[in-house]
Amino acid sequence: MNIIETIKKQIKDNIILIYMKGTPESPSCGFSAQAVKALSICGEKFAYVDVLENTEIRNELPKYANWPTFPQLWIDGELIGGCSIILEMLENGQLRELISKTVKKYKI
């Protein structure tokens, strides 16, 4: 499986997925830390990929997603965006609503 196939599989297999620097317990950048905190506030489980542990994903995902930075939040196969968008959506209630709707759709 090439790296793009791996990325596609990760996105397909995890309805809420964040590509980040570090782990949720130990983020390696402030933007990833803020994004994880926002997701945690929503109260649902999410998967993550530490891009610092996988150079190929760190190099290829920005091209595949047409999004140059990390973190990247993917929900139900769609790129939501990075830290600023995640925080804005949390503030206006859209993040919690989208996550809740997605979780209900898959009855997790």
Image (spheres, rainbow, N blue to C red):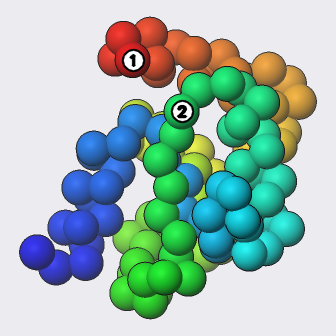
**What is the quadrant of the N terminus in the image?**
bottom left
Q: How many marks?
A: 2
The disc placed on residue 34 is none
Which residue is at 40% across, 36% downward?
15
Which residue is at 79% across, 20% downward?
93
Tell me residue 66's x, y (percent).
49, 68
Q: Name the image quarter holding residue 71.
A: bottom right
Mark 1 packing: few (<14 Cα in 10 Å), some, or many (20+)?
few
Tell me residue 19's x, y (percent).
54, 62
* Label 2: element kind: loop
Q: Is there any visible trace of residue 103 in the rendered image?
A: yes
Q: Is residue 2 above or below residue 70?
A: below
Work out how far the residue at label 1 is from the one at label 2, CA to CA, in angstroms.
9 Å
**Label 2: which residue?**
45
Q: Is residue 31 left or right of residue 24?
A: right
Tell me residue 57's x, y (percent).
40, 78
Which residue is at 64% across, 73% downward?
21
Of 36 and 60, the residue lying toward us = 36
Q: Is residue 93 left or right of residue 44?
A: right
Q: Earlier in the sequence, mark 1 or mark 2?
A: 2
Looking at the rendered structure, the kind of residue marked 2 is: Lys
Q: Name the image quarter holding residue 56.
A: bottom left
Q: Is residue 107 above or below residue 102?
A: above
**Label 1: which residue?**
108
Mark 2 packing: few (<14 Cα in 10 Å), some, or many (20+)?
few
Tag 1 and tag 2, C-beta contact below 8 Å: yes
